[in-house]
């Protein structure tokens, strides 16, 4: 055989090898479907208000099972102690100031909220070919440009304001009476139907519609936010407890039961091992009059909703992906709600938005208890005005400016305008170390001042 023939055979063999290799890659790619993602975001749930977090007077088998099948975090933080900025930070991977939502947005139809130019997890996933759905609470804008269908969601069902009565679906805070139930931007009426049941139905329908393709579902359940309307089954179960714990517990267990029903659809369709399930509370429990002035628990932590003490921002959080992520493990490293966007991008293999993110991927931390937290420092600022409440965490040191203790565990004195703690020594934050450590206070205050100048850029 001459050399020319040998070269031709060689080229043919090389082409054949390449073709076989490509076919193998395609087959492998077809088998390795991109994971679905369900992000369950609860509302006003206390720092320890799950049985597996130590609340032994609570019955929460669905969330306990999620912890057994995944990773549970003990030092996970909301980016704000109130609803709208917490949600904006989680959905954009940016601190509330950079996301354009420094405080709660209006619950009135026609009022804008999070700027439309912000990029959400839904937009990131939709760009990657995912079906995207929102079910539940929104509270990030009440105009066509700022409602879910214009923020990356193919479908949306729920209420746009801060809270609703779960049976009439009217806005709950104050008058004038406003009905607040929407589907894909259209006002709808489902009088007398229990909203948690409707959320389960809509979640099931979304999963069923998209079972053959990767999907992202933001299931923003409005429980246990007031009004505390637990089902009769759970009211009877907790009737022996004192007020207001019994009302709150009944609603938490109603919530847990709804979460269990939603996730049962994954097992029914054999999608559990193809689905990343993320769970988090938006911030701490409420002590508002509308929730019987309490009921939730922050356990050892001081503070509650509206407070930058730990009880307002340290929240229960978990992630589960059977067969791909560890199961039954606990992570004590610090992480934040801003981290979900880059973490989902890493786990699902999708491209992150080309913009500044404050979140960091915690994928390595989820895999190993030995991995470092991606955050040496983190900052919070709640609301505006001349003297907003703010906090900075640097390692174990935490400085709060203009603190509020909405849990009323202890009075905040006149000398507590700067409240310094070392969380490694005192998670209860009951003793202010600022007076004994002026150099640390000065350093952390300078760090925060520098952050404020950059936070909205």
Image (cartoon, rainbow, N blue to C red):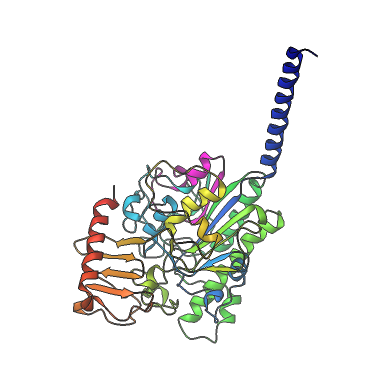
Residue 149 located within the stretch drawn in magenta: yes
In percent of width and height, residue 121 lies at 47, 48
Residue 270, picture quadrant:
bottom right
Please indicate whether residue 170 sits to the left or right of residue 430 in the image. Answer: right
Q: Can residue 220 be seen?
A: no
In percent of width and height, residue 177 lies at 39, 60
Please indicate whether residue 362 sits to the left or right of residue 357 in the image. Answer: right
17 w.r.t. 199: above or below: above
- Going 70% across and 33% down the picture, which residue do you hit? 21
Residue 421, picture quadrant:
bottom left
Q: Can residue 427 be seen?
A: yes
Nearer-the-camera pick, 40 or 10: 10
- Going 47% across and 53% down the picture, which residue do you hit? 361
Placement of the N terminus among the 4 image quadrants: top right
Residue 383, picture quadrant:
bottom left
Q: For the view shown, which residue lies furthest in the right direction?
A: 1
- Going 34% across and 48% down the picture, which residue do you hit? 112
Nearer-the-camera pick, 374 or 241: 374
In percent of width and height, residue 303 lies at 36, 75
- Going 53% across and 60% down the picture, which residue do you hit? 366
Q: How many marks?
A: 0
Nearer-the-camera pick, 140 or 182: 140
225 w.r.t. 29: above or below: below
In percent of width and height, residue 391 lies at 30, 66
- Give the extent of the magenta segment: 122-151
Residue 3 located within the stretch drawn in magenta: no
Please indicate whether residue 52 sits to the left or right of residue 3 in the image. Answer: left
241 w.r.t. 339: above or below: below
């Amino acid at each position: 055989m001459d050399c020319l023939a040998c070269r031709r055979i060689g080229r043919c063999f090389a082409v054949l090898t390449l073709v076989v290799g490509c076919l193998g890659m395609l087959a492998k790619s077809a088998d390795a479907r991109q994971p679905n993602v369900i992000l369950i975001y609860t509302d006003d749930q206390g720092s320890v208000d799950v049985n597996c977090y130590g609340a032994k007077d609570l019955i929460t088998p669905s969330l306990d099972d999620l912890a057994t099948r995944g990773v549970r975090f003990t030092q996970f933080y909301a980016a704000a102690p109130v609803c709208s900025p917490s949600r904006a930070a989680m959905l954009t991977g940016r601190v509330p100031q950079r996301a354009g939502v420094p405080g709660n947005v209006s619950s009135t139809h026609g009022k804008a909220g999070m700027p439309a130019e912000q990029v959400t997890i839904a937009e990131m996933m939709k760009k990657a070919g995912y079906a995207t759905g929102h079910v539940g609470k929104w509270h990030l804008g009440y105009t066509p440009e700022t409602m879910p269908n214009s923020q990356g969601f193919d479908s949306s069902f729920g209420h746009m304001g801060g809270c609703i009565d779960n049976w009439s679906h009217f806005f709950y805070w104050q008058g004038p009476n406003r009905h607040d139930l929407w589907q894909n931007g259209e006002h709808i009426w489902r009088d007398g139907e229990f909203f948690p049941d409707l959320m389960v139905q809509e979640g099931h329908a979304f999963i069923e519609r998209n079972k053959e393709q990767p999907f992202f579902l933001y299931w923003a359940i409005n429980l246990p936010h007031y009004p505390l309307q637990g089902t009769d089954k759970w009211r009877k179960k907790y009737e022996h407890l004192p007020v207001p714990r019994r009302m709150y517990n009944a609603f938490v267990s109603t919530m847990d039961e709804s979460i269990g029903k939603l996730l049962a659809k994954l097992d029914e369709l054999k999608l559990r091992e193809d689905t990343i399930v993320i769970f988090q509370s938006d911030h701490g429990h409420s002590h508002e009059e509308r929730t019987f002035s309490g009921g939730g628990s922050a356990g050892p932590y001081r503070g509650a909703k509206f407070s930058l003490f730990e009880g307002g921002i340290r929240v229960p959080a978990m992630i589960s992906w059977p067969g791909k992520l560890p199961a039954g493990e606990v992570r004590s490293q610090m992480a934040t709600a801003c981290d979900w966007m880059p973490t989902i991008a890493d786990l699902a293999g999708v491209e992150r938005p080309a913009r500044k993110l404050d979140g960091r991927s915690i994928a390595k931390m989820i895999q190993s208890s030995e991995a470092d937290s991606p955050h040496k420092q983190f900052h919070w600022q709640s609301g505006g005005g001349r003297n907003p409440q703010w906090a900075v965490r640097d390692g174990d040191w935490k400085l709060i400016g203009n603190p509020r203790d909405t849990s009323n565990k202890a009075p905040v004195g006149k000398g507590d305008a700067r409240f310094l703690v070392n969380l490694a020594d005192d998670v209860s934050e009951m003793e202010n170390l600022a007076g004994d450590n002026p150099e640390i206070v000065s350093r952390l205050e300078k760090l925060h001042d520098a952050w404020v100048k950059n936070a909205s850029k």
